[in-house]
Amino acid sequence: MGLRDKRRTVEVIGDGSNPRGLYQRMQQYLAWQETHHSTAQTQRNRENQLRQFVTWCDERGLSQPSEVSLRVLERYQAHLFQSRKPNGEALSVSTQCNRLNALKSWFRWLTRQHYLLANPAADLELPHQGQRLPKDVLSISEAETLLNWPDITTAKGLRDRAMLEVLYSTGMRRAELAGLVVHSINHEQGTVMIRQGKGRKDRLIPIGKRAAYWVRQYEETARPQLAGVPESDVLFLAKDGQGFSLEGLSDLVGRLVRQSGVRTCGGCHLLRHTMATQMLENGADTRWIQMMLGHADISTTQIYTRVSIKALKDIHTATHPAGLESVEIDASSSLPDASQK
């Protein structure tokens, strides 16, 4: 297996023996989803989102899907809006929408399966998310600082350097990095095959010569030292000789980001955003970036056109008649004295 999977939660909520109850219907839906274009990570997220709702219903004496009305769903939506994280922060609009979208999909399935006569979630209005820019991107020099941070004289350091290079070169997601196997990268063709990416879609993308070089160094020198028994076919191995969990991968990259000093926080997505922005600033068309990132919708990729402020500033300076570089400023001149007016 490429991606390490955690044991799924099996705790029963409410009356688990009722075949028509919320809990059993949830389990039936999850089993159906598992065979219909759902990755392991998506499945875990969906189960967690639905379990929270079923638990909320159980606490209020609601045990069957037929008892859930639009009004009940709106009350749950208000509950999410008022909920707070352990640090006291409110749930982001994106998080609220993800949880509500999970419910909309579930109740749509219940209706199609004729477990409900009508879909109570059909008219549920989601909070407006707007379009948020990526929180941060690295400059070229900052990216180089991060890539050069691992101690390549050690097996783990060489592995870390190779992983950072792959993330920076390809912009792949952390789950896609964790899912790479030993034959995913074709060194002769300079490509990497991502199997079962987001939406269970495969895609073949290029990988830079430098990243491929460090992967080769890792494969020949460090990986044999990290391999466990039985040996895994996963490309990048954790300390136990098996593949990384998503949380473990985030912790590792986040620690490297902090230790290198380029940022106080950040992870795999920092390099994904950086790769996309830098390619755009160097003239890449958004459709090529879309193919690299694996975005289903070009509008998702176009957000990077608003991140690329450097290119916009260069165009502004070169074309605006009042650009600072095209105007000689007389230092001897002074502004009018406001007191004389």
Image (cartoon, helix red, strand yellow):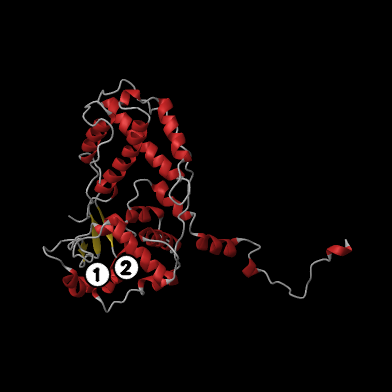
Q: As shown in the figure, which amino acid type bears the numbered disc 2?
A: Glu
Q: Give the x, y percent position of residue 166.
A: 30, 65
Q: Where's the C terminus, which quadrant?
A: bottom right
The mark that comes first in sequence, 1 or 2, is 2
- Write down the residue under mark 2: 165
Please, what secondary structure does the residue beneath circle 2 have?
Answer: helix
Q: Give the x, y percent position of residue 60.
A: 38, 29
Q: Is residue 3 above or below residue 222?
A: above
**Mark 1 and mark 2 residues within 8 Å of each other at the beta carbon:** yes
Would you say residue 83 is visible in this rendering? Answer: yes
Q: Is residue 238 above or below residue 194?
A: below
The answer to which of 254 and 210 lies nearer the viewer is 254
Direction from residue 266 to residue 22 in the image, left or right: left
Look at 37% across and 52% down and name the residue there.
287
Number of other residues with Cα within 10 Å of mark 1, as a class: few under 14, some 14 to 19, many 20 or more? many
- Write down the residue under mark 1: 215
Q: Is residue 51 above or below residue 162?
A: above
Number of other residues with Cα within 10 Å of mark 2, as a class: few under 14, some 14 to 19, many 20 or more? many
Please, what secondary structure does the residue beneath circle 1 have?
Answer: helix
The answer to which of 122 and 242 lies nearer the viewer is 242
Q: Give the x, y percent position of residue 123.
A: 42, 27
Tally of numbered discs:
2
Q: Indicate the quadrant where residue 80 lies.
A: top left
As measured in the structure, the alpha-carbon distance from the residue carrying label 1 to the one carrying label 2 is: 8 Å
Q: Residue furthest right?
A: 340
Look at 37% across and 66% down and name the residue there.
255
Q: As shown in the figure, which amino acid type bears the numbered disc 1?
A: Val
Q: Indicate the quadrant where residue 54 lies.
A: top left
